[in-house]
Amino acid sequence: MDVYALIGNPVEHSLSPPMHEAAYDALDIDARYVTFEPPEDGGAAAIESAATLGVAGLNVTIPFKQQVIEAVDPAPLAARIGAVNTVDFSTSPPTGYNTDATGVVRSFAHHGVSLSGTAVVVGAGGAGRATAFALADEGLTVHVVNRTESKARDLATAVADTGGDAEGHGLDALPDLLPGADLLVNATSVGMEEDASPVPADALHADLAVLDAVYSPIETRLLQDAAAVGATTIDGAWMLLFQGVEAFERWTGEDAPVDEMNDALRKRL
Ligand code: NAP
């Protein structure tokens, strides 16, 4: 039996175990997915321990995504983002991927959204970094907008320094940027367990495809405002699903049973 795992602190409410175990059941794979909660400075040590124990694949969540970089060989996109959420132990040293980034791209693609034109990414933390690099790599022009404007500018510079087309702004730029945007991603925590949106409703329009990384609640204020003007809406559970789908496919080499994983996830949201 193969053992896959997630490290995070805290991890007790993670939805990854049921999502991955649904995939093992669907494809008759003899495997289990368990969670571990190392101490907050224990990310790199946990990678070494998992390798020693023969763990087949590891997901990594807050607060370890940046720490574990030193214990893996990061794939180019993960190295540029500066964070790893998926570790493959079939190589030595283990390879680190950032499937949050691919999760964003696959969420848009799954909904038939063309990955071209201009994207506005609100947020410059972990989710914002993954999103900005991922969409710039797809060839989009990326505007990073953040409450702390200097972080948006720093992220845009990092994206531009590695060949992307990106600019950073403060939140007050949203009304000017959104009329020309094709894609909008909320990568802030605004809207999580609250009826609030980081984007003024009257700046939204029908030609936007809007992804909210927040998945609790599923129908955030931003997605409700976006649906009201006829925009395409994609909830945060899709991003969560596709980061898991990408991890499963990297570990097993098989196409993931996306519908079964999605059902298992949504049943618990
Ligand atoms: P993070 O690194 O802590 O970044 C938080 C971001 O939110 C920063 O840009 C911060 O701006 C902004 N922010 C916080 N409070 C704000 C406020 N009141 N007004 C405006 N901006 C505010 O967090 P993260 O890891 O990127 O996660 C961000 C969200 O994405 C969380 O809700 C998380 O659950 C979600 N997420 C979802 C997935 C998924 O698979 N669906 C994956 C990863 C993350 P400042 O820089 O100004 O502080």
Image (cartoon, grey):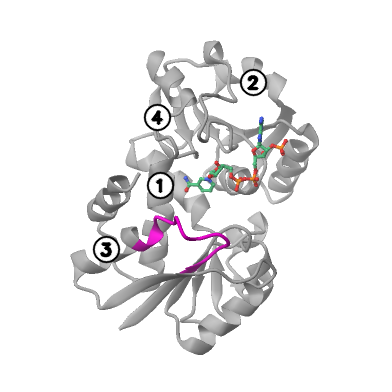
Q: Earlier in the sequence, mark 2 or mark 1?
A: 1
Residue toward you, 43 or 229: 43
Identify which residue is drawn at 38% across, 26% down.
232
For the residue marked with disc 2, what is the amino acid? Answer: Leu
Identify which residue is drawn at 33% across, 35% down.
112
**CA distance for labels 2 and 3:** 40 Å
**CA distance for labels 4 and 1:** 20 Å
Q: Examine the residues drawn in magenta and state their main secondary structure.
A: loop
**CA distance for labels 3 and 1:** 18 Å
For the residue marked with disc 3, what is the amino acid? Answer: Ala
For the residue marked with disc 1, what is the amino acid? Answer: Arg
Q: Kindly report which numbered mark, 4 or 1, lies closer to the viewer in this rendering.
A: 4
Residue toward you, 46 or 168: 46
| SS state under label 2 | helix
Residue under label 1? 106
Please tell me whether residue 265 belongs to the stretch shown in magenta. Answer: no
User: Compared to 142, does 50 lie above or below?
Assistant: below
Q: Is residue 250 visible?
A: yes
| SS state under label 1 | helix
In the rendered image, the quadrant that contains the C terminus is top left
Residue under label 4? 219
Range of residues picked out in magenta: 6-17
Residue under label 2? 174
x and y, in percent, of residue 224 in the image: 42, 21
**Res 23 label:** 3
Tell me if label 2 and label 3 are in contact, CB under 8 Å: no
For the residue marked with disc 4, what is the amino acid? Answer: Glu
Tell me if the residue at label 3 has its CB under 8 Å from ligand 1.
no
Q: Kindly report which numbered mark, 4 or 2, lies closer to the viewer in this rendering.
A: 4
Q: Kindly report which numbered mark, 3 or 4, lies closer to the viewer in this rendering.
A: 4
